[in-house]
Amino acid sequence: MKLVTVLLPEAYLEGLDELVRSGMYPSRSSAIRAAVRDLLKREVWPKRE
């Protein structure tokens, strides 16, 4: 994997931390990876078919 630095609004970080605290994701990074994956599945990858 590669390291990517992203600036996010405080409200996004609070939401990410809530997802981690609730046990839905083990880390912020994991939650962000899932969100990016879902975006790519919806917006980019279907167009390749």
Image (cartoon, helix red, strand yellow):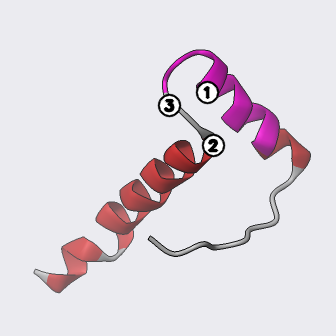
Q: Is residue 31 above or below residue 20?
A: below
Left or right placement of residue 43 versus residue 8 in this view? left
The quarter in which the N terminus is drawn is: bottom left
User: Which mark identifies residue 28?
Assistant: 2
Residue at screen point 72% across, 71% down: 5
Q: Name the residue carrying label 3.
A: 25
- Give the number of the disc on residue 11: none
Magenta stretch? 13-24
Tags 2 and 3 in contact by the CB under 8 Å rule? yes
**What's under tag 3, amino acid-wise?**
Tyr
Query: Which amino acid does the dot numbered 2 rest on?
Result: Arg
- Is disc 3 surrounded by few (<14), some (14 to 19) or many (20+) residues within 10 Å? some
Alpha-carbon span between mark 2 and mark 3 = 7 Å
Q: Nearer the viewer, residue 11 or 30?
A: 30
Tags 1 and 2 in contact by the CB under 8 Å rule?
yes
Q: Is residue 47 left or right of residue 5?
A: left
Counting from the top left corner in percent of width and height, residue 29 is at: 58, 50
Mark earlier in primary sequence (1, 3): 1
> What mark, if any, has residue 20 been given in the picture?
1
Q: What percent of the width, then of the height, locates residue 46?
A: 21, 72
The C terminus, quarter of image: bottom left
Element type at marker 3? loop
Residue in view at x 38 percent, y 59 percent = 37
Magenta-colored stretch includes residue 39: no
User: Could you tell me the amino acid type at mark 1?
Assistant: Val
Kindly state the secondary structure of the residue where label 2 is placed. helix
Q: Is residue 7 above or below residue 38?
A: below
Say which of 15 and 47 sits in front: 15
Image quadrant in which you'd find residue 8: bottom right
- What is the x, y in percent for residue 3? 60, 72
> Circle 1 — which element?
helix
